[in-house]
Image: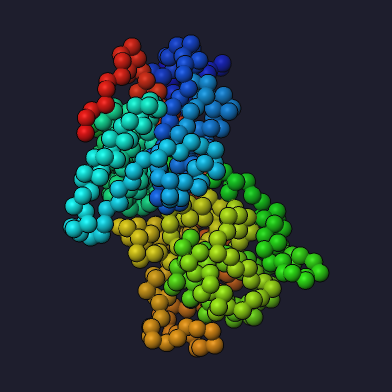
Amino acid sequence: MDLSAGGVPPGATALHALAAANPAYPNLAAMDLAEESSPALRVLFAAGGTGGHVFPAIAIADALRRMSDEGSLPAAATARIDFAGTDHHQEATHVPAAGYALHRVPAIALARPPLSWRNVLVPFKLAYAVARSIALITRLAPDVVVGTGGYVSLPTCLAAKLCGVPLVIQEQNAYPGVANRILAKLASLVCVAFAKAAEAFRMPISHDGTLGTPGARGGAPCVVRGNPIRAPLRWTKRTDARRTLSWMFYRKGCAETPKIQGTDRVLVVFGGSMGCETLNDAMADAVGGMLERDPHLWVVWQTGRGGYERVRSRVPSHPRLAVRSFIDDVENCYAAADLCVARAGAVTCSELLACGLPSVLIPSPVVTEDHQSFNAKEMADFGAAVEIRDCELAPKDPKISVQSGEPAPRRTVRLDYVIGELLYDPEVLAGMREACLEAAAPEAAEAIANDVVSVALAARRRRRGAPREPCSSY
């Protein structure tokens, strides 16, 4: 059966459809149908540290689980999904909450600068972490390991290479981090969110979306897939979201719950999970006047856990202002909003694109490799966002008090001016919404899940009939 042209004949199995979608693997269609009842496809995710690494991994895992539940996984009736990470970062909370087993592995963080004396023991600690990861891989026997970057993923991904297990790397940012730049050279396939990342990896891109031959010289081991996002973000309707979000403005003693009308304007502000002082201070200076000037404006503001008390001490309560330290219900915030002000983390940028939500992005100046600046520039180049540098929001005279009752410090950029120029220009907002949707990759999780399956099945075929080689010693 020739599937190289991309055709799927009547009665074709899911395996045939996969081969048609990925011409690099036409031989998959020749697999015996008896293999459909083979052992479960075993996938191990190496993800941890920040939410930017954890949430994309969970989104891909969710897509694999849906494929398994729907019976659309080729060559396997079910998928067995495990995670490797720490017991004290974001993965410790979110992975079990998503319904996946988390196996603890040591994580080795590199101190800055790299030549710091504190890094003297890093090679020895890394060797120990890799040895622990080898033991985990030997026990779980995964068909493929998926790494989403960050130092937490490094030991497990290195162990995968030493054990001969194929490795798939997913890079969220426009400029890749150190761990993924190392691991990309060892991977069978690299999935990037932005084409700029492939340039940094110095890898050829498969422009037609097919996989090429993973790991082969002259092949196309890098594909642009976008960032995987949580499924509810794609399903939430604006009217339902505004109805749900209205509860955030409820105050004790109110006769009824406030209602956000369809013609009202909703501004969502995300000050980072830990609290961005520069953004929060600039917003604190602006929000009172904005609400006073526009009786149809509603503001939902996540300050971050580290910024909540500071903001509450400066900003008086208002019936159309909801201030929270952290918001779990981001899908309703995105769906209800007309404009978002936020940092430029990779996950945030991808969610904004998928939701068609225009934004003002303030990249964090303290993140590794300054990757948020690259993300914000990509978003601005798309026409989906306006970028403001963190230093432009910082007070010109840091000696001026920013406590309640004091005059606002002078800044290079007034945040309320930038917000007003966008929020009250329907044509500009419409253009930005269109740019978001054009650049979005809402099916990224499903596409990457299919890539993971393809790489795993190709590896199974290569070792069919031959026992797995023992893991290399470190």
- Can residue 214 be seen in the rendering of this structure? no
Residue drawn at x 53%, y 72% is: 309
Q: Position of residue 61 (x, y in %)?
A: 49, 37
- How many labels were placed on the picture? 0
Query: At 66% across and 76% down in the image, what residue appears?
Result: 318
Q: Look at the image and tell me in which quarter the N terminus lies.
A: top left
Q: Identify the image quadrant of residue 11.
A: top right
Residue 348 visible at all: yes
Rendered-image quadrant of the C terminus: top left
Q: Position of residue 36 (x, y in %)?
A: 49, 16
Left or right: where 465 falls relative to 32: left
- The residue positioned 70% from the left and 53% from the top of the image is 240
Give the image quarter of residue 381.
bottom left
Q: Position of residue 17 (x, y in %)?
A: 49, 24
Residue 424 in the figure: left or right of residue 49? right
With respect to residue 189, does 471 lie above or below? above
Image vertical order of residue 52 relative to residue 104, above or below: below
Q: Eyeballing the image, is 384 above or below 42?
A: below
Residue at x 40%, y 23% (from the top left corner): 457
Residue 338: quadrant of the picture: bottom right
State whether residue 241 is above or below residue 411.
Answer: above
Tell which of 461 and 127 is nearer to you: 127
